[in-house]
Amino acid sequence: MLDVRDDASVMALAQALGERHGGGDIVLPDAAARIFAQVPAGQQVRAFVDTGTHGTLQMIKGFRPQLNDGAGSSRQPVRPARWRAWTRGCTTCSTLAA
């Protein structure tokens, strides 16, 4: 089972898929954590951010080396302006995006 919050889990899957299938053409990370109405929001924020934001960055970082030549014009993740604004000041985001 893949846990997008765990760097080793993402890297292991990326490597296995690269070895088994020779890489890929596209990465579409789309993980999300559940939010429960009966649980206070403050208790759910960390898991939500770790999964949706940091998990997405982990997937891009882990799978970028597995992209086939010609799969993308720059092999760089798309980062819209609002994404940069959301992650500005987040040391984890800055480290993963490097």
Image (cartoon, helix red, strand yellow):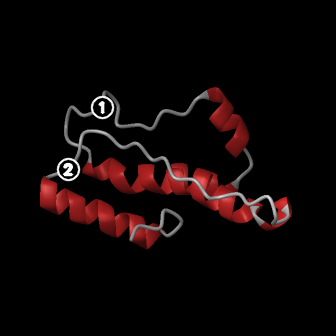
Residue drawn at x 48%, y 33% is: 78
Q: CA distance from mark 2 to mark 1?
A: 13 Å
Above or below 44: residue 61: above
Residue drawn at x 31%, y 39% is: 26
Q: Which mark is residue 72?
A: 1
Q: Which mark is residue 24?
A: none
* First in residue order: circle 2 vs circle 1: 2
Left or right: 15 as drawn, with respect to 78: left
Q: Position of residue 89 (x, y in %)?
A: 74, 49
Q: Amino acid at mark 1?
A: Gly
Circle 2 Cα neighbour tier, 10 Å, few/some/many (<14 / 14–19 / ≥20): many
Above or below 60: residue 44: below
Q: Which residue is mark 2?
A: 23
Q: Position of residue 48 (x, y in %)?
A: 67, 58
Left or right: 37 as drawn, with respect to 78: right
Q: Position of residue 57 (x, y in %)?
A: 52, 51
Residue drawn at x 26%, y 63% is: 15
